[in-house]
Image: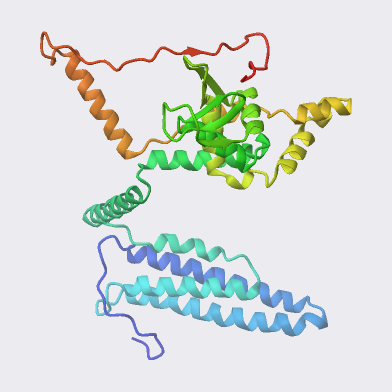
Amino acid sequence: MPDDAPAIPRQVAHPGDPSPQTCIQVARQAAILAVTAADDAMTAVCHSRSDAALRLEAAMHAAHKEAVEAEGHADRAEQYADDPTMPGSAPLYCARAAVDHAVRAQSAAGAETTAEDLRAELVRQLTAAEYAERETERRREEAEQEAKDRAATGMDADNRDQVVRNRYLAEGHVAELGWTAGHVRVLEAAESGRLYWRDGAARQAARRGVWSGGRRVSRGRTEALFAARFLVAVRQDDGTRVLTPSPMGQVALELARLHPAGLHDSEQAAYEARFARVRRQHKRRDDQKAAARVLPPLDSIARNLYRKPVTLTEQRARAERDAADRWEDQGGHCPGAQTPRPAVDSVAILPLHRHTAVQPALW
């Protein structure tokens, strides 16, 4: 080994390492790129103005120094490839060093660092056993991460992705509803199955089926949500109307929960937002105000794209129900045994007018 040659790590070549011929070729290409960069830097000095001469001259010297190193490593790559006393990894070590110096030469000269592309030719190819081991490790890490994500969210990957898509929908559509947090509270009361309308007032019953007393709920918001078809009413025998979210209302509620920042801080702010949307649709000021007092429906795009995520617990429960249904279908029931059926209360659903956009009043 020449006295000025760098020390070579004492390691043998691994299966999949580039061949010595490839290493020599890459090292020589790197040296050519480095020398070209140094020559370009020198040409720039020759054509420079006096105010830039010092800077360009410093760049020329730096590029020249790196080019000399790159050429030296390219020469040693050829020497080591023919020397049986050198480690098998020596040509690869020299080729990588030549590429490093070529990149620095191009960078010093202010040229595009095309020598970076040569690194890919020096990457060791994995053996079949190594690839299989790495793939096994990758799958193990993915399984561990999936287990952590499931434990944290209670959902599988597909449903977690659905949550992300739903949140994106919410960010684009919740503000357009013109709601406040009070509208969300009314829908949440309806979702609980305890919101009812009686004697011109909306209340949230203390428990289901007991349609008397309970906490008062905003009459104005309840009427507005009902008129906009976010709520539907079911008449009871005593004339009480139980209010529940419509399919559109349930989707709107879920989106509002995902993006509460889209809700307005006050009724006035919500009204002004709705007014801004309808202002161009009407010429008369009174018509604009009347339209702004009405809650707009949820955009059909959001209604069509929203999908409720299903938790792992819900998936297991559904699978158990499906298995029980298949067992019944295949004759698993006991002959002569009466299969219990849930009782259905006799209720009358308020009719909706088919030829008008306004629902019947609640009273």
Residue in the picture at 82% in, 83% down:
50
Say above or below: 2 vs 293: below
Task: Give the residue furthest to the right.
Answer: 284
Rendering coords of residue 296 (x, y %):
68, 28
Residue 147, above or below 26? above
Compared with residue 21, is residue 62 higher up or lower down, i.e. above or below?
below
Kindly tell me whether residue 298 is visible in this rendering.
no
Query: Which residue extends farthest left?
Result: 335
> Residue shown at 60%/72% (left/top)?
107
Q: Please, is residue 309 above or below residue 332 in the view?
A: below
Residue 160 or 262: which is nearer the viewer?
A: 262
Is 125 positioned to the left or the right of 252 in the image?
left
Rendering coords of residue 233 (x, y %): 54, 20
Residue drawn at (74%, 37%) of the image: 271
Please tell me which residue lies in front, 184 or 111. Answer: 184
- Determine if residue 217 is in view: yes
- Residue at point 74%, 39% (across, down): 273
